[in-house]
Image (cartoon, rainbow, N blue to C red):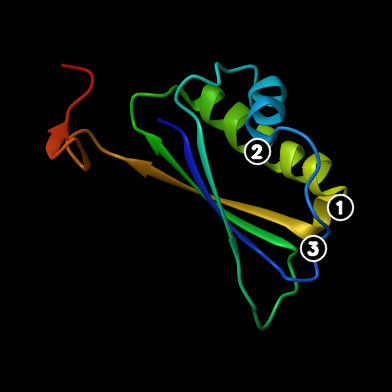
Amino acid sequence: MPIANCVISPSCPDGQGDLIAQWSRASRQSADHMTVNLIKAHQQGQPYAVVATLYLPSIWSSSAIIRLQEGLALALTQYYAIAASDVIVLTQILDSGRVVEDAESVFWGL
């Protein structure tokens, strides 16, 4: 269930390739359940080209979390052909029972 919501600056170049495949390769994780939502929006303040919020279940190990968030940052820099300093990834860890899918709460690690 890695889900990334990425707010993209209108000044960001168009993306190239398959972002999910790039993220999967960069993080060394399966693309099976990865989701990326790309949202163009105007922003003020710190001028990041991409601000990504990454949602991960608490069942992931610390090393997997690091690979997924760093892999997402790398994939975004490659996809948009931008500098790493133009991307920020904010990771939110979700506890079991804090996700609803198909109208039912999802529990892991039981």
Q: Residue at x 64, y 78 (%)?
A: 42
| Residue at the spot of label 2 | 72
In the image, what residue occupies the spot 86% across and 52% down?
82
> Looking at this view, is 26 or 79 the one in front?
79
Q: Which residue is the site of mark 3? A: 12
Please, what is the three-letter code of the amino acid marked with disc 2? Leu
Q: Nearer the viewer, residue 21 or 97?
A: 21
**Residue at the spot 68% in from the left edge and 36% down from the top edge:** 19
Estimate the spatial distance between the alpha carbons at disc 3 and disc 1, rounded to whole Å. 8 Å
As measured in the structure, the alpha-carbon distance from the residue carrying label 3 to the one carrying label 2 is 16 Å
Is disc 3 surrounded by few (<14), some (14 to 19) or many (20+) residues within 10 Å?
Answer: some
Q: Position of residue 40 (x, y in %)?
A: 62, 66
Looking at the picture, tell me which residue is in the foreground, 98 or 37.
Answer: 37
Q: Position of residue 24 (x, y in %)?
A: 63, 23
Circles 3 and 2: CB atoms closer than 8 Å: no
Residue where numbered disc 1 is placed: 82
Q: Are marks 3 and 1 in contact (CB under 8 Å)?
A: yes
